[in-house]
């Protein structure tokens, strides 16, 4: 039933072409166009419901078939133009805010009409227009709107100004009709991208530049840097939001560039260097939020991050330089290093939190720290003292995981050192003191530090240091063996000894000072010597009496009993008073044979240090003279049973000692440089002067920066000793002599 | 015997005067070099000496000067030898003679050195030796021979058992040698060494100084700081510039 109905409809609606030809009816076109014209007018007047689409379509269709397309196209154009002129008059008449609304209303009406007209003229669109390369009906209509309305002299400027003005109003805080803005800009887009760009975007950007130039001038005069950047950030955010609301997406990049240029790029240096609130202040005060914002904003500015990095670097170098060259700071090496670590932590945090862990900033930080640390040639010593302090305290503080963290951080500073061999020399000295004074950290902790150093600098760097620890372990076993193998009867009355056997070459070079030990000590130490040499063929044993310590039980004249912990030298002095009541300095010196400087320090610590005055000195002066006399302080008192008497000794090197250490390091470098030269020449056989210089520097750089003059002198020495010779033809070429 | 032109005759005379050679030898050399004087010298010096020398005469000469109780000529003998040659012992020609004799040490000639030298020089009498002096002296004008003699001087003037040359001796030798070459910086160099160095001179420094003299202009404009010069020479250049003795241009 339904199918039958459909079939009937199709038959009824079939179009029957007219039979007669043009020539037979001179008024065919005019009559046809009249019909179309009247219909279009009805469309304009919103009376399209009364029209017959099929009839109109067929009319246009017949005109095209009868070769009247050109005339039809022309008439259509004239008709549209006339209509648009009317529309323009209405739009122009609109006042103030109604202007855009009227334009929008007319645009909507026009679009609807244009679509209907296009449908009526569809056949022409498909045949005549492509063939003759004319604009399609709809496009043509749009172009006419553009040229007649949007770009009319009376509307173009006004439209642009109106749009820009509304945006200005919005920028200054008022509410505008965003929907209207959206439809207007969309109209411009529909008219063609170039219309949007030329008629709106360009003036918009120009006015924006002017606006932000003015605003930035005001803000920079009255705002702190952080506040200014906050405002700039807000403006950027607002502009992006505006684009998403009612502008073309491509405008975002352009308006951002304008804001960046006017508010940031043009004031970049002034902002960064702003007094009391600029980048340096942000860094000093750890203002993460401001720094994050500056980084994000200046990322838009060409060379913006470079400028930040540059100022940060300069600042770190300046504050670092103040830190490492301040005479006050140099008095406390541990504090010195701790401040460096704190500074490193500070900038690590800033870069991590505010600068997105930017690699170029991390590199700048590393570069700055390397510069700072090597400004002070005592840094190797101080870093070693810092490690010494931490390892000595690990037992008390009983927090080995924290120790690991601290040591890892210290290794960062170590990596910056250009004279790692100097650090090694100091580290060896400090390790020796820890080990020999019983102040070393648990072996795991000591070895943990050595593992870190080995990882950085290789096995050779730490092999002797490890040897030192091994020596102490071996010594403990040897001492136990001594007591196990020796008759307890022979040792019944002897003091207990603990011997540390130090391998020559592993330990810091020490002048061998043998003083006269008390008879009780000589006896047991000689027994040990006999045992040791009996179990180790070919060994030699030399006592180092300038090291070591002793526990002495003392009973004073007033009846007080104490256990004194003293150095070996102090023990030698104190034991003399078991058989003498009064001794002069000269007598003590003769009896003990302790070197003068050591002896004076020793006596100072026993007689002149408050709370530790187990001896009394006549006369009571601050210095020690040859004819001064000493006796036991019978009135000695102390709250503690165990009294530790430290030698008066500076932990830090004195200037002469420092010079001596440095000279020894310089001397140690010569054979290393020479060995590097020989290694290189042995493998290359023939090599030119500059290549040797480069190669040697490269090989030794992990430990120290070799001095080119020293390299040159070592080459000359090798020539003189006939390991190398100059090439007969090219004097800059060296040959290795097997 | 065809007649010589005036110019050619002069050349023969000049050659004979400088080399001490006979007229016959002079003619031979000049003809071989197409009458170019310099070429003639090269020809003459490159010829192996094929003189017939009476060995017994050489022995007699050696025995005349040797030590009574040692088989070598020493200070007294050398003094007498110079006297007979009518040469000052300090004359640089004695260095050239020592070089010919391959003398191991200054003021000493072993029998082998002395007799070997007489043979290589091609003389068997003092009279002939005296006649050879001009040509021996002229050898210093040849760059290659000068270099050989210069480097020979280091070993020859060195103390026995030492690897370096004492500063005093080195300065004396330099003054003797560079008198032949007119090195403008010689006095500065000697003064610099006494003021700044005051130590012995290594062989490398000794030999490289000659290269420095030959290759570096007295204004130091072409001195190469990275030219692998011994450090002492680097210091010398620095000394010259910082004391305003040379206005260094680059």
Image (tube, coloured by chain):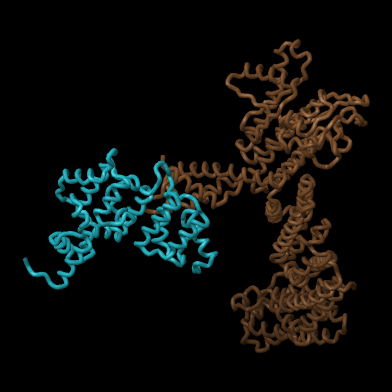
Dividing the image into 4 quarters, which one contains the N terminus of chain A? bottom right
User: Image check: A650 left or right of B89?
Assistant: right
**Drawn colour of chain A?**
brown
Residue A437 in picture, x, y percent from top left: 76, 31
User: Image check: A65 left or right of A561?
Assistant: left
Asked whether B69 or B105 is in front, the reply is: B69
User: Image check: A43 left or right of A78?
Assistant: right
Residue A617 in picture, x, y percent from top left: 85, 35
Asked whether A499 or A220 is in front, the reply is: A499
Residue at the outermost left position: B1
- Determine whether B134 is above or below A514 in the image: below
Residue B50 in picture, x, y percent from top left: 16, 50
| Identity of the residue drawn at 23% across and 63% down | B18
User: Image check: A447 left or right of A673?
Assistant: right
Label the cyan chain with its letter.
B
- The quarter holding residue A380 reads top right
Judge whether residue A539 can be spotted in this image.
yes
């Amino acid at each position: 039933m339904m199918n039958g109905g459909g079939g009937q409809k199709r038959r009824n609606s079939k179009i029957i072409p007219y039979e007669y030809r043009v020539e037979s009816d001179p008024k065919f076109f005019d009559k046809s166009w009249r019909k179309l014209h009247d219909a279009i007018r009805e469309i304009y007047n919103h009376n399209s419901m009364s029209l017959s689409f099929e009839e109109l379509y067929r009319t246009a269709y017949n005109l095209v078939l009868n070769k009247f397309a050109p005339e039809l196209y022309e008439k259509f154009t004239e008709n549209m133009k006339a209509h648009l002129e009317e529309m323009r008059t209405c739009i122009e008449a609109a006042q103030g805010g109604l202007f855009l609304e009227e334009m929008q209303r007319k645009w909507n009406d026009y679009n609807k009409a244009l679509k209907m007209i296009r449908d009526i003229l569809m056949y022409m669109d498909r045949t005549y227009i492509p063939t003759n390369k004319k604009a399609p009906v709809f496009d043509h209509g749009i172009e006419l709107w553009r040229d007649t309305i949007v770009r009319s002299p009376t509307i173009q400027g006004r439209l642009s100004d109106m749009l820009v003005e509304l945006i200005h109003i919005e920028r200054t805080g008022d509410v505008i009709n965003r929907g209207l803005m959206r439809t207007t800009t969309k109209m411009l887009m529909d008219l063609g991208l170039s219309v949007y760009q030329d008629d709106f975007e360009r003036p918009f950007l120009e006015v924006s530049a002017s606006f932000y130039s003015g605003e930035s001038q005001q803000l920079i005069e009255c705002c702190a840097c952080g506040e200014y950047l906050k405002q700039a950030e807000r403006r950027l955010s607002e502009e992006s939001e505006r684009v998403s609301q009612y502008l073309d997406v491509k405008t975002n990049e352009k308006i951002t560039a304008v804001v960046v240029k006017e508010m940031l790029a043009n004031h970049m240096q002034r902002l960064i260097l702003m007094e009391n609130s600029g980048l340096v202040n942000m860094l000093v005060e750890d203002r993460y939020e401001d720094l994050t914002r500056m980084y994000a904003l200046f990322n838009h500015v060409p060379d913006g991050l470079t400028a930040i990095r540059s100022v940060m670097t300069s600042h770190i170098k300046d504050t670092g330089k103040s830190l490492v060259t301040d005479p006050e700071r140099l008095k406390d090496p541990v504090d010195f290093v701790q401040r460096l670590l704190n500074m490193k932590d500070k900038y690590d945090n800033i870069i991590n939190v505010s600068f997105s862990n930017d690699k170029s900033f991390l590199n700048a930080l590393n570069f700055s720290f390397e510069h700072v640390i090597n400004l002070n040639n005592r840094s190797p010593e101080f870093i070693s003292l810092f490690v010494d302090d931490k390892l000595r305290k690990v037992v008390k503080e009983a927090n080995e995981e924290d120790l690991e963290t601290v040591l890892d951080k210290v290794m960062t500073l170590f990596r910056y050192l250009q004279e790692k061999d100097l650090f090694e020399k100091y580290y060896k000295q400090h390790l020796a003191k820890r080990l020999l004074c019983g102040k070393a950290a648990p072996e795991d902790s000591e070895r943990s530090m050595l593992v870190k150093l080995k990882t950085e600098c290789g096995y050779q760097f730490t092999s002797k240091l490890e040897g030192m620890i091994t020596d102490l372990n071996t010594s403990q076993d040897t001492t136990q063996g001594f007591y196990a193998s020796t008759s307890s009867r022979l040792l019944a009355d002897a003091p207990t000894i603990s011997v540390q056997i130090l391998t020559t070459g592993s330990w810091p070079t020490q002048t061998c000072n043998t003083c006269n030990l008390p008879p009780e000590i000589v006896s047991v130490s000689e027994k040990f010597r006999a045992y040791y040499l009996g179990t180790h063929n070919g060994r030699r044993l030399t006592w180092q009496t300038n090291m070591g310590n002793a526990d002495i039980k003392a009973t004073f004249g007033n009846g007080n009993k104490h256990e004194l912990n003293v150095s070996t030298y102090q023990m030698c002095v104190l034991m003399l008073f078991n058989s003498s009541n009064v001794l002069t300095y000269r007598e003590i010196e003769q009896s003990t044979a302790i070197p003068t400087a050591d002896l004076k320090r020793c006596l100072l610590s026993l007689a002149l240090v408050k709370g530790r005055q187990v001896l009394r000195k006549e006369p009571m002066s601050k210095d020690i003279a040859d004819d001064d006399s000493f006796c036991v302080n019978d009135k000695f008192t102390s709250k503690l049973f165990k009294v530790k008497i430290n030698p008066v000794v500076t932990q830090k090197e004195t200037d002469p000692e420092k010079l001596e250490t440095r000279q020894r390091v310089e001397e140690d470098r010569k054979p290393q440089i020479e060995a590097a030269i020989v290694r290189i020449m042995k493998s290359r056989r023939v090599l030119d002067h500059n290549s040797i210089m480069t190669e040697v520097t490269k090989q030794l750089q992990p430990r120290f920066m070799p001095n080119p003059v020293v390299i040159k002198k070592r080459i000359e020495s090798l020539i003189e000793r006939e390991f190398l010779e100059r090439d007969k033809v090219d004097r800059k070429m060296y040959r290795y002599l097997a | 015997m065809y007649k010589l032109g005036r110019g050619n005759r002069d050349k023969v005379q000049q050659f004979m005067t400088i080399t001490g050679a006979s007229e016959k030898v002079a003619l031979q050399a000049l003809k071989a070099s197409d009458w170019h004087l310099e070429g003639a010298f090269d020809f003459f010096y490159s010829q192996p000496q094929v003189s017939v020398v009476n060995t017994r005469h050489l022995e007699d000469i050696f025995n005349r000067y040797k030590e009574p109780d040692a088989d070598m000529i020493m200070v007294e003998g050398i003094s007498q030898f110079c006297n007979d040659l009518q040469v000052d012992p300090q004359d640089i020609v004695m260095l050239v003679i020592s070089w010919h004799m391959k003398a191991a040490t200054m003021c000493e000639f072993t029998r082998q050195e002395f007799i070997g030298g007489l043979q290589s020089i091609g003389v068997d009498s003092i009279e002939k030796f005296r006649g050879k002096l001009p040509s021996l002296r002229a050898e210093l004008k040849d760059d290659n021979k000068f270099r050989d003699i210069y480097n020979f001087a280091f070993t020859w003037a060195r103390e026995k058992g030492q690897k370096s040359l004492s500063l005093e001796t080195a300065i004396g030798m330099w003054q003797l040698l560079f008198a032949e070459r007119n090195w403008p910086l010689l006095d500065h160099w000697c003064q610099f060494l006494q003021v700044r160095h005051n130590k012995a001179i290594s062989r490398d420094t000794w030999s490289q100084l000659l290269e420095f003299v030959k290759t570096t202009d007295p204004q130091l404009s072409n001195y190469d700081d990275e030219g692998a010069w011994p450090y002492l020479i680097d210091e010398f250049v620095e000394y010259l510039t910082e004391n305003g003795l040379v206005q260094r241009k680059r």
